[in-house]
Image: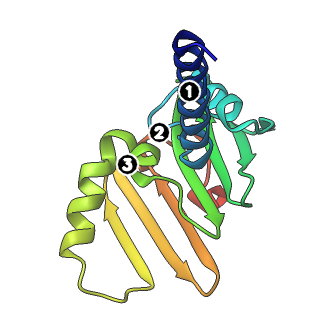
Amino acid sequence: MPNHSRTVIHTMRLRILATAIGLLALASSPSWAALGGDAESIRRDHRALGAADLVTLRSGYELHEAQTADGTRVRQYLDPAAGRVFAVTWQGSRQPRLGEVLGSFAPRYFSAANAHRGSHHVMSVSEPDFALTILRLPRGWQGEASVPGALPAGVDRREIR
């Protein structure tokens, strides 16, 4: 086989390998509509995951649900009038990438986590404009983050779960 043919085959194999690695990276590191994100960011996330965007219309908000291949369920609460995600919850064997889920609130979470001296099973932040609770369960994680002041009128915080 001439050298040129070997070089072409080698280049093609490298491109296929690079494409496969890129696709695996996308599949193993899902992103989510961040707290404060918009409706289009939810749809983009669900398309990237290959997850159906199950939407439930509630009084004052839309509940968007997705489930990853490993069983992690993420719920995003959207205020259709404002066009923003006002809360995100998750439950599963692993946590979603919190930097993406929390968006602009992520630095506040990481700062609180570094200062946290309580139980290693519960992490909680309660501020007027940011609330977060993360529970380490025997077989996974459960979390909830919200912007309390962004809850639509008439929506009870207890509905966020």
Residue type, label 1: Ser
Residue 154 seen by the camera: no
Query: Residue 149: x percent and y percent?
Result: 41, 44
Q: Is residue 17 visible?
A: yes
Residue in the image at 74% along x and 39% along y:
59
Q: Residues within 10 Å of mark 3 (few under 14, many from 20)?
A: some
Q: Residue at x 45, y 85 (%)?
A: 121
What residue does disc 3 label?
Answer: 99
Q: Name the residue that disc number 2 marks.
A: 34
Task: Point out residue 156 in the picture as x, y percentages from the top left corner.
Answer: 61, 54
Which quadrant would residue 55 be assigned to in this image? top right
- Quarter of the image for residue 73 reads bottom right
Q: Earlier in the sequence, mark 2 or mark 3?
A: 2
Tell me the residue that label 1 is attached to: 41
* Coordinates of residue 25 in the picture (x, y in percent): 54, 42
For label 1, the crowd category at 10 Å Cα-Cα, with few meaning under 14, some 14 to 19 and many 20 or more, is: some
Indicate the position of residue 159 as horizontal and vertical percent values: 66, 57
Say which element carries label 1. Answer: helix
Most extreme residue toward the front is 1
Residue 44 is drawn in which quadrant?
Answer: top right
Q: What is the distance, in whole Å, between disc 2 and disc 3 at their CAs?
A: 9 Å
Q: Work out whether residue 45 or residue 103 is closer to the camera in this orientation and state it.
A: 45
Query: Amino acid under label 2?
Result: Ala
- Mark 2 or mark 3, whichever is nearer to me: 3
Assess whether mark 2 and mark 1 are in contact (beta carbons under 8 angstroms). Answer: yes
- The residue sitting at 33% across, 66% down in the picture is 125
Real-space Cα distance between discs 1 and 2?
Answer: 8 Å
